[in-house]
Amino acid sequence: MQTIIKYFWKLLWFAKNRIYQKILWLFYKASQGGFFKKVGAGVIFFGNPTFGSVEGNISVGDKSLIGRKIFLSCSKDGEITIGDHCSINTGCHLVAIKGIRIDRGTLIGEYVSIRDQNHGFEDPNMLVLEQGFSANPIVIEEDCWIGRSVFIRAGVTLGKGCVVGANSVVTKSFEPYSVIAGIPAHLIRHRGDKLEH
Ligand SMILES: CC(C)(COP(=O)(O)OP(=O)(O)OC[C@H]1O[C@@H](n2cnc3c(N)ncnc32)[C@H](O)[C@@H]1OP(=O)(O)O)[C@@H](O)C(=O)NCCC(=O)NCCS
């Protein structure tokens, strides 16, 4: 009997998440004309994301977790791809004119800002807001862990398995398994260095 009750609660919990997902999905579709290109199976939204531009393609892979107060913006030619088993924590901003790719199993701490564009500002006689944007895609390969409040600049690629310390500003690309931190982020060591052999 206890086993049946246990499985009943598990089923209810699973159904709750599925129903919640579907309601969110329908709400977004109805109100904004379909924000996501794809939401994978078992994705959990902890709150309703806020959307900026939603003309591009935004997709979320299977079993990813999308935290509270997430801001997503994807322009017409842009693409935001969040892979399977990713976790995007509270308050993150993902803004793409060209592309942001976050691969499988990557964990992103709270209040991380990932933007693939910069305002043009070279002409001092013109308002910055009139100078358009330049954009360069960002790639975060699988199994990375990004600490809280990190900023990742346009054009950066973080190789597989990178770790980024809290509050870092990532201005350039790093090879796989780099552990980086600071402003600007620099290499501290590689993952595995502290393992005893
Ligand atoms: C980077 C991190 C993973 C630690 O890595 P580590 O290899 O164990 O680092 P260590 O403690 O050995 O420190 C190595 C050096 O990096 C520096 N460092 C570590 N974290 C740093 C950070 N966030 N910013 C700047 N420097 C940092 C240390 O001061 C030390 O410098 P030193 O050699 O000059 O003394 C950890 O400090 C961190 O920032 N974790 C993120 C936690 C987080 O944001 N959690 C919430 C999201 S899930």
Image (cartoon, rainbow, N blue to C red):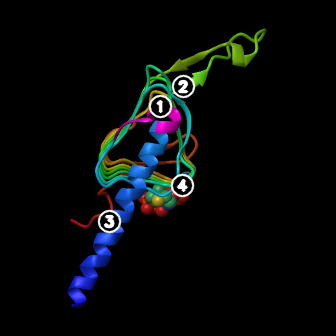
Task: Give the vertical position of 26 relative to 99 (above or below).
Answer: below
Q: Going 28% across and 77% down the picture, which residue do you hit?
A: 8
Mark pair 2, 3: CA separation: 38 Å
Q: Answer with the quarter of the image where residue 17 lies.
A: bottom left
Q: In the rendered image, is residue 151 in sight?
A: no
In front of the other: label 2 or label 3? Answer: 3
Q: Which mark is residue 33?
A: 1
Residue 48: horizontal and vertical position, in percent?
A: 53, 50
Mark pair 2, 4: CA separation: 24 Å
Residue under pointer 3: 14
Packing grade of label 2 (10 A; few <14, some 14-19, many >=20) is: many
**Which span of residues is magenta-colored?**
30-38
Q: Which mark is residue 23?
A: none
User: Relative to residue 122, is residue 180 drawn left or right?
Assistant: left
Residue under pointer 2: 117
In front of the other: label 4 or label 1? Answer: 1
Residue 50: horizontal and vertical position, in percent?
A: 57, 43
Q: Amino acid at mark 3?
A: Phe
Q: Are marks 4 and 1 in contact (CB under 8 Å)?
A: no
